[in-house]
Amino acid sequence: MPVNPGKKMGLEKSERISKIAIDPENSDIVFVAALGNLWNSSPERGLFKLPMAVKHGEKKYSNVDENTGCCDVAIDPGDPNIMYAGMWEFRRTPVSFSSGGKGSGLFRSSDGEKPGRRL
């Protein structure tokens, strides 16, 4: 049964979803790139696998901190175990905007489950 687009799947406090990628072999599995809260750190920043991630608090790239959101995700159509994710550390304040940092980078996962390695 495909994911119902009108059904809440979690991540209600993420505020900003930059992209959703659907597993080409199983449409019940989606990966959500969440930039998260613009003004604060948040556990709802990063790349999440739904529907299981929110229920169990699992992040796909758990090695990135709560200051880093996921700005893009791509699944290799020939091998859905290969994924790429762009991670972006950023913070806005009333008087400034900080972009980039130790959590930013491009990550690749080749097994579809474990945290990816930085490229």
Image (cartoon, rainbow, N blue to C red):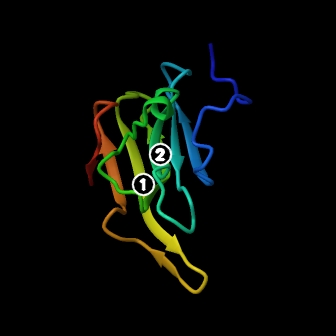
In this rendering, is residue 4 above or below 14? above
| Quarter of the image that includes the N terminus | top right
How many numbered marks are there? 2
Disc 1 secondary structure class: strand
Q: Name the amino acid, label 1.
A: Gly
> Looking at the picture, does residue 74 appear above or below residue 45?
above
Label 2: which secondary element: strand
Residue drawn at the location 35% of the way across and 71% of the way down: 101
Q: Residue at x 41, y 28 (%)?
A: 78
Q: Which mark is residue 100?
A: none
Badge 1 density bin: few <14, some 14–19, many ≥20, Cα 10 Å = some
- Indicate the position of residue 2 as horizontal and vertical percent values: 63, 18
Return the disc, 2 or 1, that comes first in the chain's sequence: 2
Which residue is drawn at the image coordinates 46% and 39% (left, top)? 48
Dividing the picture into quadrants, the one containing residue 15 is bottom right
Q: Residue furthest right?
A: 6
Q: Residues within 10 Å of mark 2 (few under 14, many from 20)?
A: many
Q: What residue is shown with label 2?
A: 73
Q: Which residue is mark 1?
A: 86
Point out residue 85 in the picture as x, y percentages from the top left corner: 41, 48
Dots 2, 1 in contact, CB < 8 A: yes
Q: Return the x and y of residue 84 as percentages of the image width and height.
A: 39, 45
Q: Is residue 89 left or right of residue 16?
A: left
Decide: is 24 above or below 90. Answer: above
Q: Depth check: give the residue in front, 3 or 91.
A: 91
Q: Give the alpha-carbon distance from disc 2 to disc 1, as whole Å.
A: 6 Å
Q: Amino acid at mark 2?
A: Val
User: Would you say 6 lies left or right of 3 here?
Assistant: right
Question: Residue at left 34%, top 31%?
Answer: 112
